[in-house]
Image (cartoon, rainbow, N blue to C red):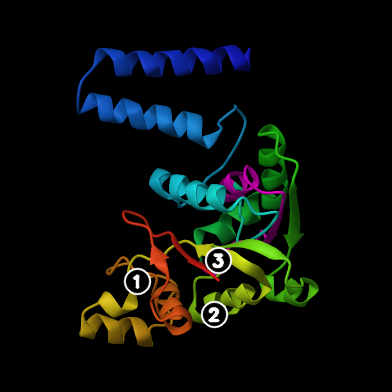
Amino acid sequence: MQAGCDMLMKQLLKSILRRFQKPVYRLARELVDFYEYSGYYGNIDLHTMMTLAERKTLESIVARKKPEVAVEIGSWKGASTTIIARHSGVVYAIDPFTGAPDSWEVHSAARHDVLKVFRNNLRIMGISNVIPIVGKSADVFNVFGRCVDFVFIDGDHTRPGILADLRWREKLRFGGVICGHDAETYYSELPEELRMEVKKSTADYLVDRGLHPGVIYALYTVFHDEHMIEPGTSIWWCQC
């Protein structure tokens, strides 16, 4: 029954594309993209702060690399995990599954078993090459040798947190890629006054600025802004 409903929904949305012109066309195209790209199969909860463009960008990066071993730091309910897993041999998904402190995630985790939701999402989407690790990345850093091909970071966005996670570049094999979310711009491209604000900030997110200061300044500290931020997204990456 669900499969039949899914097919009917796809046909309905695609029929909109054939019948209407812009701007309805653009809306319908986005609906079809979201439906097909997200892998929605019914009873699944893949809530994510990543935009559709960012999810597609992440897929493009990991698909080019085709890692044998991938590490994801910050998995939550598995939206990015499923993308990485589609193009990887094995994915180690590291997350305490309790949410970031002082965030809406904490309240969500108090009501739901997020790890159970994560496992259920992977099961529904037919993904079996993910090994969840409950904890923080620092807890298992020394367990891994230099055997990783791809690292995706979307966990603790404070400066100490992101700096700790960026240490995982040491675990990459030659030519490996480290990648992440929420780098809205390069530190060196900010106006001087805003650079000082970002540098001094201890916040996870500056709402009035629309910036994650910890991520932006940590990337500058480690890579001196020689990493890439994909246009139209906050996805960053660097080949090591």
Mark nearest the camera among 1 and 3 is: 3
Determine if residue 37 is in view: yes
Separation of residues labelled 1 and 3 (CA atoms):
24 Å
Question: Where does residue 114 sit, x and y in percent of width and height?
Answer: 67, 51
**In the depicted structure, whether residue 111 falls above or below residue 46:** below
Instruction: Give the left or right position of residue 137, taking residue 157 as reference.
Output: right
Q: Residue at x 45, y 52 (%)?
A: 49
Disc 3 residue type (three-letter): Ile
Q: Nearer the viewer, residue 106 or 100?
A: 100
Q: Which residue is labeled 1 in the image?
A: 206
Please tell me how crowded label 3 is: few (under 14), some (14-19), or many (20+) other residues with Cα within 10 Å. many
Give the number of the disc on residue 43.
Answer: none
Residue furthest right in the image: 143
Please tell me how crowded label 2 is: few (under 14), some (14-19), or many (20+) other residues with Cα within 10 Å. some
Instruction: Give the left or right position of residue 30, taking residue 130 as reference.
Output: left
Q: Quadrant of residue 236?
A: bottom left
Asked whether residue 93 is drawn in magenta, I would say yes
